[in-house]
Image (cartoon, helix red, strand yellow):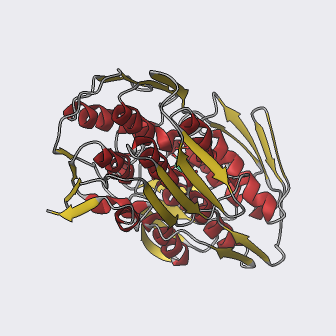
Amino acid sequence: MKLYLSGPPQKKLYSKIQITGSKSESNRLLLLQALYPNVEINNLSNSDDSQVMQQGLKIHDGVVDIHHAGTAMRFLTAYFASQEGKEVTLTGSQRMTERPIKVLVEALKSLGAAISYEREEGYPPIRIKGKKLLKDSVSLPANISSQYISALILIAPSLSNGLQLELVGKITSVPYIQMTLGLLNEIGVKTSFEGNRIRIYPKASVDVATLTVESDWSSASYFYSIVALSDFGAEIILSSYKRNSLQGDSVLAEIYRDLGVKTVFYENEIQLKKIGNPKSKTLNLDLANAPDIAQTIAVTCFGLGIGCNLTGLHTLKIKETDRLEALDTELSKLGADISVSDKSLTLSPGKNRVENVAIDTYNDHRMAMAFAPLALKTPLYINDAQVVSKSYPDFWKDLKKLGIDIRKT
Ligand SMILES: O=C(O)C1=C[C@@H](OP(=O)(O)O)[C@@H](O)[C@H](O)C1
Ligand SMILES: C=C(OP(=O)(O)O)C(=O)O
């Protein structure tokens, strides 16, 4: 599906949007629910990634295809490795077979798991024969993906002695690890995280616990970008959000304040308001703790005509696509002066914008959603626009509510 986005309304934008639950929180809670059936979940994400997670958890024997879902791949690897009597092959999309999993497989094997590679060593598909894992301490590199660590933490309370993890190297995407620990705490599991050591205490069962997933902050980023790029002002209300979020991407409120967007927190929602122009000509940010909003921020800066130096982007090359290369290619097509390394992105200030460019999305939901707000500044095409369903199936419907003209071509 190719979309043409044009015709932003020449007036202030108002809208009220209910965004689906966080896919990160949802996929963690789905796994915890499989281990502790008393866990009940409200506001579950309707994303493809949470659907495949739900379906994967139902399988006992056979092939589990998780498509593009990184969290499902990593979390289900740990889950099936610890489930005595279950035997599955975990696989996914072509891209998933290029996303590394060796660190997690090695860590699980050191705990006693039986996992083998079906094709290339270090990458899915993998064959898992579930076993009771008897060891209670593990050491693993922490600088490649936090999902390996979260996967181990999620199964840890179900192991008879719990688990101690020693993290080696600089820990990346830390808020996602804290989210995992926070959710365990909410169901009554005791944890500690000091320096490079995490300890999870065992828990045989959980009293009935209903948890409400907060809406997805990464999805909210696209509305922050829209408000920042609006020429006639904007007031957008998003629900359901809270001030004390488990999601690291809630740092958006702080980041976009410097780009002219104010966030007002109400009980269950946030209001985004355009209050001015960017504070400086160049934005400098380390996004090692919030990698998923890098694309949104780079495109906002381009649309505003300001520059940015984004660092801490070493995980972007192994996500749904090589996001650094994809941003370089697509922003260059639009006229940007941009350069990337394997962990950073530099955009020079400038108002040069080519019209009617067709943005390629590389099977990456965030490429489609990050570029869409640019329609407020210049008409553009989005190729394979259906990719948004990985995290936010209603994205285009919600965008239409703002009055942006969206047509299938
Ligand atoms: O644990 C999670 O829910 C996630 C962790 C992050 O991955 P990395 O730790 O690989 O950076 C993030 O990019 C991803 O979208 C979701
Ligand atoms: C990187 C992402 O997801 P995952 O790693 O779970 O595929 C994402 O949603 O931006």
> Residue 216, located in which quarter of the rendered image?
bottom right
Height in image: 400 above or below 303? Answer: below
> Residue 377, located in which quarter of the rendered image?
top left
Q: Nearer the viewer, residue 239 or 209?
A: 239
Height in image: 151 above or below 55? Answer: above
Give the residue displayed 44% in from the left and 45% down from the top. 225
Q: Does residue 22 appear in this view?
A: no
Quadrant of the frame with the N terminus: bottom left
Give the residue displayed 58% in from the left and 71% down from the top. 44
- Residue 96 in picture, x, y percent from top left: 38, 52
> Residue 185, located in which quarter of the rendered image?
bottom right
- Residue 151 in picture, x, y percent from top left: 62, 54
- Residue 394 in picture, x, y percent from top left: 40, 68
**In the drawing, does residue 326 fall left or right of residue 188?**
left
Give the residue displayed 50% in from the left and 65% down from the top. 17
**In the drawing, does residue 339 fall left or right of residue 244?**
left
Height in image: 8 above or below 348? Answer: below
Q: Nearer the viewer, residue 372 or 6?
A: 6
Give the residue displayed 66% in from the left and 74% down from the top. 41
Quadrant of the frame with the C terminus: bottom left
- Number of labels in the image equals 0
Q: Does residue 204 appear in this view?
A: yes
- Residue 32 in picture, x, y percent from top left: 68, 67
